[in-house]
Structures are given as C-alpha cells and as structure tokens.
C-alpha cells in the first residue's frame, strides 16, 4: 500500500497544468494523498480491489489516452484519466504523460499537495 500512496503523490507532483485547471487536479491529488496517509484496512482493501481490476481495464487504455490528450483542459478528461489511473497503476499513466507532455517537471511540485485555497 505504501508504494501505491507514494505513486499517487508522485503523479500529482509530476503534472504541470494551467492555472485554470490546477484546482481540480490539486483537489483530486490532495484527496488521494489524505486517504493514503490515513492508512487502515479500508484503504488497503480499496486499493487492492482497484488493482485487481487492472486486467479487465487494460484494453481501454488507448481510448482513455486519446480522450485525455484531446481534452487535456477539461475537468471530465481529468476525472476519467485519474479514475482510470487508479485502476491500471501509476507507471503506465506516467509513461503516457511523459510521452505526451514534454514540459513535465518530475518531482518538483510537492507543494501542490496542500489543500486547495478556497479563499479568494
């Protein structure tokens, strides 16, 4: 479980997105990070369940990739892609992101794991 939690933290840190979309991404990354940090049997069981679905989902990666690349700046594409990443594992997702977005700055955005600033 620890490696999966680290993977989610890394995935959130790896992305550079425009200011208009950072709130959606940050909120999702923060939620998963908080879930992982709490630990517990429920979180372990859910992660194990999602990983167990990997074989079932493998054939769908190309469709999700295409949607993600075509609609990078939409909330729906973020949601679909990150929900899918929970099922297929972080290495495949990071490989797609690295190949499609040359401006990724790996590991340098850890501050994005702070809760979203809702005051404006």
Image (cartoon, rainbow, N blue to C red):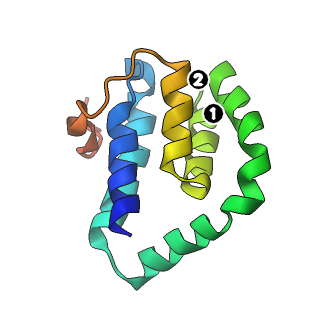
Classify residue 100 by image quadrant.
Answer: top right
Left or right of 119 on screen, residue 66: right
State the quadrant of the N terminus: bottom left
Please state which of residues 95 and 81 is positioned toward the viewer in this rendering. Answer: 95
Mark 1 secondary-structure assignment: helix
Question: In percent of the image, x 54 and y 53: which residue is there?
Answer: 89
| Residue 41 higher or lower than 9, as above or below | below
Classify residue 69 by image quadrant.
Answer: top right
| Residue 76 higher or lower than 104, as above or below | below
Within 10 Å of disc 2 (Cα), the crowding (few <14, some 14-19, many 20+) is: some
Within 10 Å of disc 1 (Cα), the crowding (few <14, some 14-19, many 20+) is: some
Q: Earlier in the sequence, mark 2 or mark 1?
A: 2
Left or right of 50 on screen, residue 28: left
Q: Is residue 34 at all visible to an observer of this figure?
A: yes
Residue 72 bears which disc, if any? 2
> In the rendering, at what x and y percent does residue 60 appear?
77, 45
> In the rendering, at what x and y percent does residue 11 appear?
40, 41
> In the rendering, at what x and y percent does residue 61 appear?
71, 42
Separation of marks 2 and 1 at Cα, in angstroms: 6 Å
| Residue 18 higher or lower than 49, as above or below | above
Residue 92 bears which disc, if any? none
Please state which of residues 84 and 95 is positioned toward the viewer in this rendering. Answer: 95
Question: In percent of the image, x 74 and y 35: which residue is there?
Answer: 62
Confirm or deny contact between disc 2 and disc 1 (CB under 8 A). Answer: yes
| Residue 108 higher or lower than 85, as above or below | above
Mark 2 secondary-structure assignment: loop
Q: Which residue is mark 1?
A: 77
């Amino acid at each position: 479980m620890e490696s999966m939690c680290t993977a989610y933290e890394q995935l959130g840190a790896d992305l550079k997105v425009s200011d208009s979309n950072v709130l959606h991404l940050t909120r999702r990354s923060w939620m998963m990070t908080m879930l992982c940090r709490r630990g517990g049997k429920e979180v372990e069981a859910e992660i194990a369940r999602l990983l167990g679905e990997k074989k079932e989902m493998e054939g769908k990666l190309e469709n999700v990739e295409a949607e993600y690349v075509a609609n990078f700046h939409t909330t729906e594409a973020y949601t679909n892609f990150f929900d899918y990443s929970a099922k297929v594992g972080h290495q495949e997702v990071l490989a797609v992101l690295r190949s499609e977005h040359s401006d990724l700055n790996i590991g340098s955005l850890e501050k994005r794991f702070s809760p979203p600033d809702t005051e404006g």
